[in-house]
Amino acid sequence: MKRFDIKSIPEFDVELFKRFNAKDEEAFNLLMEFHLPLVYEVCYRFAPSATYVDDLVQESLWAIWKNAHKFDHTLGKFYIWIAVISRNITINFAKSKAIRNERRLICHMDAELIAA
């Protein structure tokens, strides 16, 4: 996958973002053509393991699509918005994985204490 390059982002197109806000699939695909490397980089950077990156990218893309109506170009840049969504999904996944691992460790330790 190619690296995200902010210079590769096309000029802001109000009509394209209006279509994106209205959940137009073609607009989503055009925007992701330029921004997918960013989503991948963010997920890769924050994922607890590289084995989860593809799933986290997929979940991020779903969240971006699902929340398309919430993006407001007057409040900030699109690439920042999708980077934050991707980061939050990845961090939440990492936290839940850490909590599950901690619970397993505690249960394992309790079982050893009971057996002793």
Image: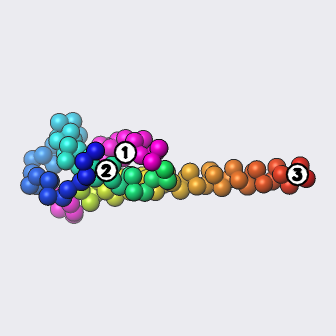
Q: How far apart are marks 2 and 3 (CA)?
A: 46 Å
Task: Say what secondary structure mark 3 lies in.
Answer: helix
Q: Can residue 44 be seen in this view?
A: yes
Labels in figure, total: 3
Amino acid found under the numbered disc labelled 1: Val
Residue at (63, 52) in percent of width and height: 101
Residue at (62, 50) in percent of width and height: 100
Left or right, 53 with reference to 14: right
Q: Does the magenta stretch include residue 35?
A: no
* Residue 32 numbered mark, or none: none
Circle 1 Cα neighbour tier, 10 Å, few/some/many (<14 / 14–19 / ≥20): many
Q: On the rendered image, what quadrant is the N terminus found in?
A: top left
**Residue 48 percent coordinates (x, y):** 49, 53
* Residue 57 numbered mark, or none: 1
**Residue 34 percent coordinates (x, y):** 19, 47
Q: Can residue 68 be seen in this view?
A: no
**Residue 7 percent coordinates (x, y):** 14, 58
* Residue sitting at the far top: 25
Magenta region: 50-77
Asked if the residue under mark 1 is in contact with the one under mark 2, i.e. CB atoms within 8 Å, the reply is: yes
Left or right, 83 with reference to 105: left
Which of 68 and 7 lies nearest the eye of the viewer?
7
* Residue 39 numbered mark, or none: 2
Task: Say what secondary structure mark 2 lies in.
Answer: helix
Q: Distance between the residues labelled 2 and 1?
A: 6 Å
Circle 3 Cα neighbour tier, 10 Å, few/some/many (<14 / 14–19 / ≥20): few
- Which residue corresponds to mark 3? 114
Asked if the residue under mark 3 is in contact with the one under mark 2, i.e. CB atoms within 8 Å, the reply is: no
